[in-house]
Amino acid sequence: MAKRQVMFTFPREMIKEPIIYHLSHKFEVVTNIRRADVSEDRGWVVLELEGADKEIEAGVAWVKEKGVRVDPIVGDVVEG
Amino acid sequence: MSYATGLRCRKCGQEYPLQPIRVCDFCLSPVEVNYDYKAMADMLSRQKIAEGPFTMWRYRDLLPVAGGEEIDIGTGFTPLLKADNLGRELGLDELYIKNDCLNPTYSFKDRAVSVAVTKAREFGFDTVACASTGNLAASVAAHAAKANMKAYVFVPANVEPGKLVGVAVYKPNLVTVEGSYDDVNRLCAELAQRYNWGFININLRPYYAEGSKTLGFEVAEQLGWRAPDCVVAPAASGLLFTRIWKGLQELSMLRLIEPVNTHMYLTQATGSSPIVHAFEAGSLHVHPMTPNTLVTSIAIGNPADGYDALMIARQSGGGASSATDEEAIGGMKLLAQTEGIFAEAAGGVVIAGLKKLAADGAIKRDRLTVACITGAGPRTQEVVSDVVRPFHVQPNLESFREVLGVEV
Ligand SMILES: Cc1ncc(COP(=O)(O)O)c(C=O)c1O
Ligand SMILES: [Zn+2]
């Protein structure tokens, strides 16, 4: 089992979609939300995903395909 | 001895022992080093610091390192120069340049890395690693050489080979990674989880961060133990910006300077300006963006310390300003041609940002302002290659006189 800590950023039109619910039902991924906020124009969620590497991989790809931005919570690691 | 007492989450306050960890287990926010300031205050004085070496390690008591020898290649105590020519150009009477180009690997990163590698050895790691497109990579490789440690340096495969000379010369394990910038990010985040390495800007990040405070300490000491009225600095992950502020606050807490009333201004390249966006939008959250700028040294779209940098810019009564690539290049040239300092494009962003802040009246003429120039020009000199337009003459006086139009 692997864990991945990520931030999802939802564009306005996606805020009402139950993306995280679907992520945990379509894939064998446990979702564990740590912080979140929604404003008028965007929403973000910081969460931990737990599951087999492959499932996390596929789940994240699906979330991205839906138009949600996915970033590692440690921020960009590649620095100047 | 060290006055560091532990790590604490910047968001939820959860405390942790001084270990190599990257984020708070609970809320996944950055953690930072905490100190016993009371004990520190009893023991530190201006004089004690002034008697230390002329490097960043004169502030050793304010850094989170234990008794062992530091990994030092001569970093810090860089010049703080009064910039009258540039000041005249921008309408600022009290302008200073903190010239951090003059570090051993030509950027301020040496400050952070010197502490991180010292700490890596303390923790018993035999290998340090980082992912970088230039400055951080060079600094990590150089410090690893000095520390006799193994180094892995990950670089996106599309970085021009010429840029890697200043990294490879220290003989780290230089790894170029195929794929997008995001792919490199993801691989490194994964490697950091799987390998027992000191990953400089991941599990050593809390310590790495503290090294950057020394820039703030030096500015205050070099001004005769006072904080400036305004600081203008670049922000990529936002770390340096937050630590300059922390450095000034600490000096004031230790009563080495008066209470700080410094306005902190951060600058970013327009093509990679998520913090400036958040500032301008009045937002409480820094939304990531995909960077698109030639100022590669500060091209970070998802800044790990963006939130804290944003708060400091706001709460200090400072601001945030961005510069296009063109403006940044103009800034580089202006700095070189007024003050004789050849900075890299991040320095150009600072100067261009400062120019706007002065023109808008955000920074007033009589304010004691320090512009932080954090990296030297030569590593990426191709961005200003158009400056080379020599006069071409034949080897005789006549030709010289004719081409240059200068009479004897
Ligand atoms: C020259 C230069 N200036 C500024 C920065 C910004 O540093 P930070 O990530 O601490 O905001 C970097 C590194 O990313 C850099 O290389
Ligand atoms: Zn926390």
Image (cartoon, rainbow, N blue to C red):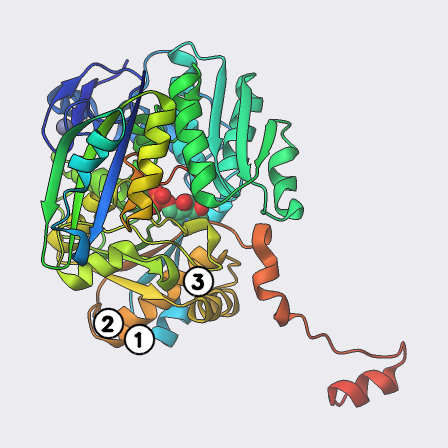
Which one is in front in this view, the residue at disc 1 or the one at disc 3?
3
3D distance between C-alphas at marks 2 and 3: 20 Å
2 or 3: tag closer to the N-terminus: 3
* Residue B321 horizontal side relative to residue B314, left or right: right
Nearest the viewer among B362 and B365 is B362
Q: Position of residue B225 (x, y in %)?
A: 23, 44
Is the C-beta of the residue carrying label 3 under 8 Å from the nearest atom of ligand 1?
no
Question: For mark 1, what is the residue?
Answer: B91
| Amino acid at circle 1 | Gly
Callout 3: chain? B
| Amino acid at circle 2 | Arg
Say if B33 sits above or below B335 in the image: above
Q: Is residue B101 visible?
A: yes
Do the numbered discs 1 and 3 sit on residues whose CB atoms are within 8 Å?
no
Category of crowding for the residue at label 1, using alpha-carbon neighbours closer than 10 angstroms: few (below 14), some (14–19), many (at least 20): some
Question: For mark 2, what is the residue?
Answer: B365
Q: Secondary structure at mark 3?
A: helix
Residue at x 33%, y 50% (from the top left corner): B235
Q: Is residue B231 visible?
A: no
Residue at x 20%, y 57% (from the top left corner): B278
* Residue A24 horizontal side relative to residue B343, left or right: left
Which one is in front in this view, the residue at disc 2 or the one at disc 3?
3
Say if B383 sits above or below B11 in the image: below
| Amino acid at circle 3 | Gly
Nearest the viewer among B395 and B179 is B179
Question: For mark 3, what is the residue?
Answer: B348
Is the C-beta of the residue carrying label 1 under 8 Å from the nearest atom of ligand 1?
no
Do the numbered discs 1 and 2 sit on residues whose CB atoms are within 8 Å?
yes
